[in-house]
Amino acid sequence: MFGRSKTTNDQLAEDALAHREGAKNRPTPRRRDQEAARKRPLVVTDRKQARAQDREKRREAMSKARQAMITGDESHLPPRDKGPVRRYIRDHVDARRNLAEFMLPFMLIVLALSFVRTSEILLMVTVLTYGILLTAIADTFLMWRRLRARLVEKFGEEAARTRGNGMYAAMRAFQLRRSRMPRPQVDRGQFPA
């Protein structure tokens, strides 16, 4: 009313400023409004809903971890399987034929033989059991010594001394190849570089 009327140039300049590329193009929100929007109670009042949300989050995390165990995705693996050293150990164990992985099928045969109650067969069962067990332990020990030397060569002395790596390799060697988790990512004979 008392101001001057806007010209066409003024309107064009105002429109250009209002929709600039990369500009915020809106007023800054007040701090009070932002804090009110972020407020959530520390303890949820609806216990059923909280339990359902927690269950859904756990289910989603378990699903991601399970999928990572199948595909070998490092980002969602459990902490015990994460890292380049553990990946190297898995690939090395999966690339070789371990005597320990065949121990379970042999033990089933030995178990079937143990039902026959003759002294000769019971003696044979005992000898087979201890023989298979000692052979598997010796093979796993030799495998770990070679693997440890490769770990020192590739990752340094610190990686080979990390507690639990030997047991991780041994437990993986004693499992059947098909039942190993995370699933083997290499073929037999395809040792890691």
Image (cartoon, helix red, strand yellow):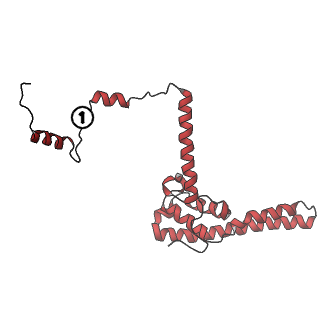
* Residue 18 image position (x, y, % from top left): 20, 40
**In which quarter of the view is residue 179 placed?**
bottom right
Relative image position of residue 157 (x, y in whole percent): 47, 65
User: In the shown orientation, is residue 175 left or right of residue 115?
Assistant: left
What residue did someone put label 1 on? 28
Q: 173 or 61: nearer the eye?
A: 61
Q: Which of 45/161 is in front? A: 45
How many C-alpha atoms fall within 10 Å of the one at disc 1: few (<14), some, or many (≥20)? few
Instruction: Give the number of callouts.
Output: 1
Say which quarter of the image contains residue 134: bottom right
In the picture, measured across the screen, residue 38 lies left or right of residue 5, that is right
Would you place residue 10 above or below residue 133 in this image?
above
User: Where is the N terminus found, in terms of image quarters?
Assistant: top left
Q: Type of residue at label 1?
A: Thr
Q: At x 51% / y 59%, what residue is drawn?
A: 162
Q: Please give the name of the residue rendered at 11% of the width and 40% of the height, measured from the top-left corner.
A: 8
Q: Is residue 58 above or below residue 126?
A: above
Q: Can see residue 153?
A: yes
